[in-house]
Structure formats: C-alpha cells, structure tokens
Amino acid sequence: EMLLIGLTGGIGSGKSTVADALAARGAGVIDTDVIARELTEPEQPALAEIAATFGADLIGPDGRLDRDALRMQVFSDPDARTRLEGILHPRIKDRMLERLAALDAPYAVLVIPLLFETNQHTLVDRVLVVDIPEGAQRERVRRRSGLTLGEIDRIVASQISREERLALADDILDNSGDLPALLAQAERIHLKYIDLAEDGKD
Ligand code: ATP
C-alpha cells in the first residue's frame, strides 16, 4: 500500500506550488482541481449535467463553461452549491482513485482544496496543510485573480477556518515567507515522506 498524503490549504495558500515541488522530486501527484477542469471540458457528461441544472447560458458559444458565472451562482446559494458538488464530487473521487491505482511513485499526494469540508481526510494516511496568514492570502489571491476583496472574503468564509485546519494537520508548511522559504520546507517534507514510505514497507 502506497503512503497517501492529503495536501490542502485555503484558497491561494500555495497548494499548487507545493504540489509541483513534490512532483519534481518524484512524488505521485493527483490534483482534484485539474480533474474538475477535465470533467467540465466541452462534451463531458458532467458539463451537460451542469448546463441542465444551472442553465444552458453558462455554456459559451465555444462550448466552454463560464466558470466565473457558475461560481457567482453557487456562492450566493448554498442549495445550488450542494447540487453542483453532487454532480462533481463523486466523479472527481472516482477519477482520483482510478489515477491513484495506476501511480508508480514512492508516495502519493492528493491535492484536495476542500479535504476536511468533504471528509476526505479519512482517505489519507497524513494531512499536509499549507498555511498562510489571512492578509497575505487576500493579497495573493487578488493579485492572481479578478476577484474583489469582498468575493475573496466570502470564499475564505465558506472554507474551514485557518485554526481548525491547522488543528487537523499532521504536517504544516508555513507560507508566510517568500517562495524559496516555501520550497525549502517542501524539500524537507519530501525527505520525511520518503522515509515514512520506506518504513511502511517493513
Ligand atoms: P488555489 O486555492 O487558488 O488553487 P493554491 O493554494 O494552489 O491556490 P498557488 O497557486 O500555489 O496556491 O499560489 C497562489 C499564488 O500565490 C500563485 O500565484 C503563487 O505563485 C503565489 N505564491 C505562492 N506562494 C508564494 C510566496 N511564498 N510568495 C509569493 N507568492 C507566492
């Protein structure tokens, strides 16, 4: 059985950056955001179901999903959000487990933004949290996305709190510093996971 790490953190915390660094070292990385995007590409069954549920106007003339419009629709409506999750989450999980079964790596990292919110921490051996102070989080998300501060705050408020997330973590990377500081921590945790994976084989 492969050592399974669940990688999570709030929006803009640095999950993808850490996942890329671990993948470059040889970890088997499966990113559920990537899977969610694949599942909602043109012609995919999940996209048809989203259009049937939320309106065909969410699909542009090019057949592509208007992600911003969908996000607006579900953020102001918890029932809509539940319906969207009902369409996507089972499919994401199936595809994730399929890829996991095909992985050949010393250990596997599942990148799951809503790991605790969706109870998927029960699937993994250890939880790795990328932690970021809220001020830096708002700044980084704003710089990278077209979201307003109000929208960012609503997304942050819809996720588990920073304190709860940290309390549930087995390992924590502190991303309050610069990128080299984060990458140095990623290198250390990679070596730890290699050791743990070796121990697990005895
Ligand atoms: P999301 O939740 O939106 O998927 P994420 O948790 O995967 O985000 P990243 O995409 O890794 O986060 O990082 C968010 C942004 O912040 C990126 O543009 C990234 O390059 C930048 N970033 C990450 N860590 C740092 C850092 N320590 N210093 C400066 N910029 C950083």
Image (cartoon, rainbow, N blue to C red):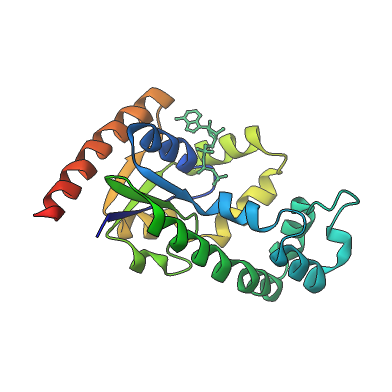
The location of residue 108, given as percent across then percent down, is 34, 50
Residue beneath the point at 51% across and 36% down: 136
Q: Is residue 11 above or below residue 164?
A: above
| Residue positioned 69% across, 66% down in the render | 46
Whole-percent x, y for residue 58 in the image: 83, 59
Q: Residue 95 placed where, x, y %? A: 52, 61
Quadrant (top left, top right, bottom left, bottom right) of the C terminus: bottom left
Residue shown at 64%/37% (left/top)? 142
Instruction: Give the mark count.
Output: 0
Q: In the drawing, does residue 108 fall left or right of residue 83? A: left
| 140 and 62: which is toward the camera | 62
- Residue at the (33%, 36%) spot, across then down: 26
The image shows residue 150, relative to residue 141, as above or below, that is: below
Position of the N terminus, as image quadrant, is bottom left
Q: Is residue 97 left or right of residue 193?
A: right
Q: Is residue 151 left or right of residue 196?
A: right
- Give 125 or 161, whichever is nearer the viewer: 125
Pick the front one: 77 or 186: 186
Q: Is residue 178 visible?
A: no
